[in-house]
Image: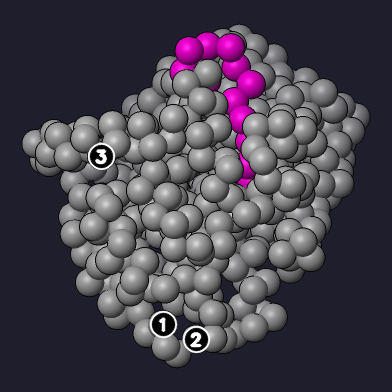
Amino acid sequence: MKIIFLILYNFLIFPIIFFSFIIAPFNRKLKEGIIGRFESLKNLKKFDSSAFNKKYWFHVASHGEFQQVETLINSFKKNNNNIGVVVSFFSPSGFNNVDNQNIDCKVYLPFDFPFTISRALKIVNPDKIFFTSNDFWPNFLYLSYLKKIELILTSARLNDGNDFNSILKNLYQKMFLDLFNSIFTITENDQKSIAKLTTSSNVFFAGNPRLDRILNNISDKSIDIKDRLNKKILVLASIWKEDNNVLFPAIFEYLEKVKDSKIVIVPHEINDKNISFYSSLLNDRSVSYKIIDTYCNILDLDERVIIINKVGFLSKIYCQTFLTYIGGGFSKNGIHNLAEPAATGNPVIFGPNFQNSNKLDAISLKAHNAGFSVNSRKELIEIIDNLCNMDFYNESSKNAMNYVAKHKGSTLKIMELL
C-alpha cells in the first residue's frame, strides 16, 4: 500500500508543484515559500556538518509547531553543544518568525522530489530526524527510513473527528507510522490508538512540550496581579477577519463600562492592511490608540487601545493583561494557542471552531471554567461581564494557571526516553 501510494504521489507531485508556480504570483505566502525552497540546498551547503559530532534535523510546519520542539532543541544543545541542529519549515510563518540561537541551520523544507531530498540528506547526513505532529512528506520520510536514519515523531496525535477530512488525514498518517523508531504522543488516548496502528513498541505518552516552553518563558517575568486587576487590560490575540465581525463594535462596550481598562489588538497577520483597518476603526470612534513594534510596559501607556505591529513579544504582554480573547474560532482554521495566556492567569475566550491542535486545551479549560467558547457578540459581552465579577474571575484565573502547570514535564520525559 505504501509503495503504491509513493508511486502515485511522485506521479502527481510534479504537476501540483507546476500549478503552484502558476498561482504563486497571486498568493504572497505561496510565492515566498517557493522562492525559499529554491534556496534550501544552497543554505544547507553552508551548514558545516563536519563541525559537529552529531546532527539532528527537526522538521516543523509552522511557528506554532516549532514551539512544540523548541525545548527539545534547547535541551539537546545544553547537554551537548557538539550537536548540530537543522530546522526546516514548511510555512513562511515559521521560517520568518523563529529566531533561536541554538539553530545552526534554518531552511525551508526542500521540494519533496526524490532527487532533491536525497541531495539534502547527503549534505546534512543527520543522525536523527524529528517530525512534529502530522506534517509528513512522503519522500522525505521514506528516503530517510531507507538510509536507516533514526526517525522520531513528537506531539503525535490522531484526528478524532468523523468527517471525511479527519478520516482522510488519519489514513494518510497510518501509512507512515511504521517508519518511526520512536513516537511520543500528546495524550494517553493517542498513545493507545497509535500503538494499535504500528508495529513499533516505542509509542509513548509524553504530553505537549509546548507547555514547557510557555512555562520557561514566563518563569523569569514578573506577573503583578495587583496592577493587572487595576487596569483590566483585555487582549485580542491572533485576530482574523471573521473575529472582527464579532468583536467590533461590540467590544468597545468594555472600554465604556470599565473606565480604567485598555484593549490590546494583535492581528493574526501583521501587515499594513490590517494595521490600517484597526486604526481607521478607532479613528472613526475617536478612541485613543498607539501602535507599537517593540515590547514595552503597556500598563504605563495612556492610550486606551494598543495595536501590536510586531511578532515575538506577545507572551510578555500576557503577563500584563487581565483577560484574553483568542482568534481563529470563527474561521475554518480554528483557534490559536490558548495555553500561553492561560499560563499567566488569563482566562481565555474563543469562537466555536476549536477542532484543531488546540482542541485538548480548549476542552480542558472549558471544563474548569478557565476557557469560554462563544457563538455570538451577545455571548461574548455576557462572558466578559461575568469575568468582571472578581470572585468568578479569581477562580477562573487560578484554574487557568493550574491547568498549564499541571501538564509540565513533557520535554524531560522525551529526553529520558531518547
Q: Is mark 2 on a helix, strand or loop?
A: loop
295 over 45 or under it: above or below? above
Magenta-colored stretch includes residue 156: yes
Q: Are the residues flagged by discs 2 and 1 in contact, CB closer than 8 Å?
A: yes
Which residue occupies 9% across, 36% down?
22
What is the magenta range?
154-166
> How would you rate the neighbour count of disc 1 (Cα within 10 Å): few for under 14, some for 14-19, many for 20 or more?
many
The residue beneath circle 1 is 49
Q: Is mark 1 on a helix, strand or loop?
A: helix
Magenta-colored stretch includes residue 266: no
Q: Distance between the residues labelled 3 and 1?
A: 29 Å
182 over 81 or under it: above or below? above
The residue beneath circle 3 is 10
Q: How far apart are marks 2 and 1 (CA)?
A: 6 Å
Q: Along the polypeptide, which appears first: circle 3 or circle 1?
A: 3
Which residue occupies 73% across, 25% down?
363
On the picture, is 114 further left or further right than 183? left
The residue beneath circle 2 is 52
Q: Is mark 3 on a helix, strand or loop?
A: helix
Q: For residue 284, what is the image quadrant?
A: top left
Q: How far apart are marks 2 and 3 (CA)?
A: 33 Å
**Quick check: can you spot residue 254?**
no
Colour approach in the figure: one colour
